[in-house]
Image (tube, rainbow, N blue to C red):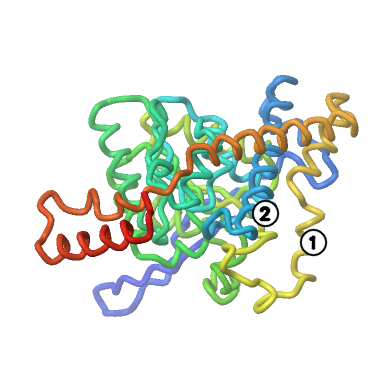
Amino acid sequence: MADSLSETTPDESGRMDTTPIDLGHIEVLQVLDEQGHVDESRDPGLSDAELLAVHRAMVLTRAFDSRMLTMQRQGEMGTFAPNLGQEACMVGQVWELTKQDWFSPSYRSFGAQIQRGWPMERLFLLWAGYHEGFPPPEGVNDMPFSIVIGSHVLPAVGIAMGIRRRKDNHAVVVNFGDGAMSQGAVSEAMNFAMVDQAPVVFVCENNGWAISTPSKLQFATEHLAGRGTGFGLPSIRVDGNDILGMIVAMREATRRAREGEGPTFVEALTYRLSLHTTADDPKVYRDDSDMEPWQDRCPLARMEKFLQRRGLLTSEAAAAVTAECEAEVLEAREKFRKIAKARPREVFNHLYRSTPAELDAQREEYLRRLDRKGVD
């Protein structure tokens, strides 16, 4: 579809010139439909082994999400943001990245982080509030995830600008939700990226809700991809529940970044089937019927239909993969439990190089209370 905007610069007579300005074609990409059929002309050509690996990555993401929710409800985990129904979007956006590329995640990105090499026990630590869980693992070019909406997008562009100046052929992927598109920092980031021709891919996970605000109350345009073209960025809309479509879109976007062709904006259309966070109750602001069409578009279900059509997966094999992934998550949980030891005496550490006297006095009182209670 072609978008246009009327030029509003006054001419010499003072009248406004209303000649349409073409903002470029916005492609809507889908490779794998809800019934598991593939558009052969757009098939990314993954090998059988790669297809099975992609499927397993999505199953592992869902198993981790489910276990995290159980642990949170049992008081073993802090507040976190589930990503049920967004597995294809998560895995697909990082599938084409190399170890030299960078990834800057938002807070709903643990599926992508697992794919990038974060041990699951480390992610358990992160969401349980342990500092050790926040720094990226050694050798993983990821930024710590961001809680403040859209705040991580500008630093991601800064990394990409640095990569361009060093003449490295690497890419940066930064993701955020549709709610972040209402933050000025995201618009500033896209503008800086386009002006600098920074090798960054912006991935907007449009899951229909900015916490409790539906898309129709957040933006009046037909789509968000047009925001990218407004800054001059090549932009595309992708079926975010289509793992093959996500891989195709990200393959081209990261290629452009690595070859010096500048940034790309990808709007991934998906849906948040679960909670915004575990502190949220979506029943307050949306009906269960809203989710029904999206349950039929489940990314895992459509991938399994496709693999079955290809003769690569049976129902029994799919169940075995699920069992293996659940066992892997449980193993990570046990590792987490062994290392998740509270250290209350360190609460005041690492705040100041030189601790203010007032805080020193508070620390001494705090330590005395721990002593009285026999807390190590």
Q: Amino acid at mark 2?
A: Thr
Query: x%, y% of residue 111?
Result: 58, 42
> Which type of secondary structure does the marked residue at label 2 adopt?
helix
Q: Amino acid at mark 1?
A: Pro
Label 1 sits on residue: 293
Label 2 sits on residue: 70
> Which type of secondary structure does the marked residue at label 1 adopt?
helix
Dot 1 or dot 2: first in sequence order is 2
Q: How packed is label 1: few (under 14 Cα within 10 Å), some, or many (20 or more)? A: few
Query: x%, y% of residue 312?
Result: 84, 24
Q: Is residue 62 left or right of residue 265?
A: right
Q: Is residue 201 left or right of residue 306?
A: left
Query: x%, y% of residue 224?
Result: 53, 60
Give the residue at x 63% y 53%.
Answer: 71
Q: Is residue 81 left or right of residue 155?
A: right
**Cα distance, mark 1 to mark 2?**
26 Å
Give the residue at x 51% y 32%.
Answer: 116
Give the residue at x 50% y 34%.
Answer: 118
Give the residue at x 31% y 56%.
Answer: 371
Q: From where the camera sits, is residue 280 visible?
A: yes
Q: How packed is label 2: few (under 14 Cα within 10 Å), some, or many (20 or more)? A: few
Q: Please say if 10 is above or below 269.
A: below
Q: Please say if 191 is above or below 172.
A: below
- Disc sitting over residue 328 in the figure: none
Q: From where the camera sits, is residue 239 visible?
A: no
Q: Is residue 169 left or right of residue 280?
A: left
